[in-house]
């Protein structure tokens, strides 16, 4: 989560694709670890995201992040629904070119609860049977956009990541290192200490409401 936030502070856009070292579940900024544990028991780590969205089981699937820097002209980006459709449209196209039959959902599916995969919404990616394959949450901060998503229930062909990057940007520079710039590791540990490992971040009331479990 700290790495994603650092990317969102940059002056260039980023596509980050990564895995998890241990069985993990993430939950949206306004949700709780208690609810995540109840819905998806047995994980090693329960992690609060900076973005919204539901509760996501990362024990399978592919996690990705897209960041957009604040605009040079100072204007805001289009509404979240527009960006969501644009990013997922690019992802759906990349998956289709990589052997996955899928499409964007045209309307919200019936509410299945707080587990993200139980309640597909408009512009989520689904297979031909309506089963959710990809969803995401977004956050805006000081004009920048952070989009965190998961692909699950499909196995795209090798090279799908490059296809997605090319759908999102005219010019792409690939970075294979876990440390994309000098000093990244130091910034990462500093942000973890200040925010993501602090008691305030783990506070189930989030400083503004009663605990909901």
Image (cartoon, rainbow, N blue to C red):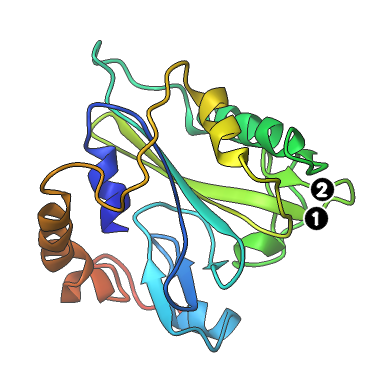
In the image, residue 110 lies at what x, y percent?
Answer: 77, 56
Total label count?
2
Q: Which mark is residue 188?
A: none
> What residue sits 12% from the left and 67% below the top?
193
Residue 3 appears left or right of 29: left
**Would you say residue 84 is visible in this rendering?**
no
User: CA gap, disc 1 to disc 2?
Assistant: 5 Å
Which of the 4 image quadrants contains residue 20? bottom left
Residue 205 placement (x, y as % from top left): 30, 73
Residue underneath mark 2: 127
Say which residue label 1 marks.
131
How crowded is the residue under tag 2: few (<14 C-alpha within 10 Å), some, or many (20+)?
some
Contact, mark 1 vs mark 2 (Cβ under 8 Å): yes
Q: Is residue 160 left or right of residue 205?
A: right
Q: Dot 1, crowdedness within 10 Å: few (<14), some or many (≥20)?
A: some
Residue sitting at the far right: 129
Q: Secondary structure at mark 2?
A: loop
Report x, y in % for residue 9.
22, 38
The picture places residue 6, in percent across and down from the top left corner, at 23, 46
| Residue at figure coordinates x 50%, y 83% from the top left | 43
Q: Would residue 100 be found to the left or right of residue 121 on screen?
A: right
Q: Is residue 54 visible?
A: yes
Q: Is residue 165 above or below residue 43?
A: above
Mark 1 lies on a secondary structure that is loop
Q: Quadrant of the N terminus?
A: bottom left
Q: Is residue 57 above or below residue 15?
A: below
Residue at 39% across, 22% down: 77
Of all residues shown, which one is farthest toward the bottom?
Answer: 42
Quarter occupied by residue 199: bottom left
């Amino acid at each position: 989560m700290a790495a994603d936030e650092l990317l969102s502070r940059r002056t260039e856009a980023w596509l980050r694709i990564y895995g998890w070292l241990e069985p993990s579940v993430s939950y949206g900024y306004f949700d709780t670890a208690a609810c995540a544990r109840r819905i998806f028991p047995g994980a090693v780590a329960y992690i609060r995201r900076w973005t919204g969205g539901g509760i996501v089981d990362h024990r399978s699937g592919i996690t990705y992040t897209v960041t957009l820097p604040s605009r040079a002209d100072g204007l805001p980006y289009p509404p979240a629904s527009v960006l969501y459709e644009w990013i997922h449209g690019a992802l759906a196209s990349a998956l289709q070119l990589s052997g996955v039959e899928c499409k964007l959902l045209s309307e919200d599916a019936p509410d299945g609860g707080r587990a993200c995969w139980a309640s597909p919404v408009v512009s989520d990616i689904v297979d031909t049977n309506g089963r959710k394959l990809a969803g995401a949450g977004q956050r805006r901060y000081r004009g920048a956009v952070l989009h965190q998503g998961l692909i699950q229930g499909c196995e795209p062909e090798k090279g799908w990541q490059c296809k997605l990057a090319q759908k999102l940007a005219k010019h792409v520079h690939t970075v294979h290192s876990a440390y994309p710039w000098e000093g990244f590791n130091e910034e990462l540990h500093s942000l973890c200490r200040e925010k993501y490992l602090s008691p305030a971040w783990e506070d189930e009331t989030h400083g503004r409401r009663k605990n909901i479990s």
